Image: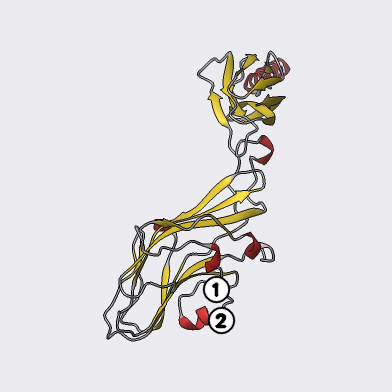
């Protein structure tokens, strides 16, 4: 009798395990063609009913193979806009870049770093407000950096005692982005998140005013002494990239027979659908791929 009881308990336990076992989701995808035109609605027809379906279109930022990528050889790009007015207007605001600054806002640490003047790559205001700088590539400054090094951007203001007084400079907007070879844009900072620090080199009476809206060096009278002040961004990681993302199409509570999508640019796209069953006791996943050619 005892053996029968043990056998019955084992059978019940085995049945429970089998009941709780996560099954591989049954799932297939098909399209009516492999070539479409830009603007066409591509219809993906599904068979099977997995718990979850995630769609990767194959476009930049939506590639399945890069879903875990966090590092890439990017082009670090910045752009900003400026205003100059009052006094004698001349190019006394410089755009500086460093790959070895340590991030400490002191005159000693500023002087110890290597700074490159790239002012000639930007357009600065000559009196018009919000003059756009244009997009400036800093890729060359990240080529030989070790993995933990950062690229710093600074605006250096210099002026001297003169009858017209010293002029006002304002940096109105700022943005920094990494752009990967496959076209993924990873935002790094805007004006309000630039981590700005100011360093006074000469004449502590006049320094940069830093707000979330702008960087401002006020104008002054003819009696103000020579001045030099820097405002420096936080360090930017030129290799940082946001992992590619898929679009969740369904979860366990829904049923989905297909998905329609429109491509806006010609090219060849590897489309991936990931189907999954995710439970408390495990998970199973499978992918289905379709290569599409999108013509102009």
**What is the x, y in percent for residue 257?**
58, 13
Q: How is the image coloured?
A: secondary structure
Residue under the point 63% across and 59% down? 139
- Contact (Cβ within 8 Å) of mark 1 with mark 2: yes
Q: Which mark is residue 112?
A: 2
Quarter residue 206 falls in: bottom left
Label 1 to label 2: alpha-carbon separation: 9 Å
Quadrant containing the C terminus in the rendered view: top right
Q: Which mark is residue 102?
A: 1
Residue under the point 51% across and 17% down? 254
Q: Is residue 270 above or below residue 236?
A: above
Quadrant containing the N terminus in the rendered view: top right
Quarter residue 288 falls in: top right
Say few, some or many: other residues with alpha carbon within 10 Å of mark 2 (under 14 / 14 to 19 / 20 or more). Answer: few
Residue under the point 56% across and 15% down? 256
Q: Is residue 118 above or below residue 77?
A: below
Residue under the point 65% across and 30% down? 266
């Amino acid at each position: 009798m005892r053996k029968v009881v043990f056998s019955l308990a084992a059978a019940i336990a085995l049945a429970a395990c089998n009941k709780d076992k996560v099954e591989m989701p049954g799932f297939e995808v098909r399209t009516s063609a492999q070539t479409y035109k830009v603007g066409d609605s591509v219809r993906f027809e599904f068979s099977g009913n997995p718990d979850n379906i995630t769609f990767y279109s194959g476009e930049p930022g939506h590639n399945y193979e890069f879903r875990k990528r966090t590092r890439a050889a990017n082009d670090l790009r910045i752009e900003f806009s400026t205003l100059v007015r009052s006094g004698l207007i001349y190019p006394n605001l410089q755009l500086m870049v460093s790959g070895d600054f340590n991030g400490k806002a002191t005159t000693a640490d500023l002087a110890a770093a290597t700074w490159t003047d790239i002012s000639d790559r930007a357009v600065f205001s000559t009196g018009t407000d919000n003059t756009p700088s244009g997009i400036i590539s800093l890729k060359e400054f990240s080529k030989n950096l070790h993995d933990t090094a950062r690229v710093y951007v600074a605006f250096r203001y210099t002026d001297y005692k003169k009858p017209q007084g010293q002029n006002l400079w304002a940096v109105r907007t700022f943005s920094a982005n990494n752009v990967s070879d496959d076209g993924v844009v990873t935002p790094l900072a805007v004006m309000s998140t630039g981590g700005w620090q100011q360093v006074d080199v000469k004449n502590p009476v006049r320094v940069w005013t830093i707000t979330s809206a702008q960087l401002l060096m006020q104008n002054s009278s003819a009696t103000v002494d020579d001045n030099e002040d820097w405002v420096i961004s936080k360090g930017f990681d030129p290799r940082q990239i946001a992992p590619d993302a898929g679009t969740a199409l369904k979860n366990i509570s829904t049923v989905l027979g297909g998905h329609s999508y429109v491509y806006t640019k010609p090219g060849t796209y590897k489309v991936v659908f990931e189907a999954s069953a995710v439970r408390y006791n495990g998970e199973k996943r499978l992918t289905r791929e379709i290569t599409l050619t999108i013509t102009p």
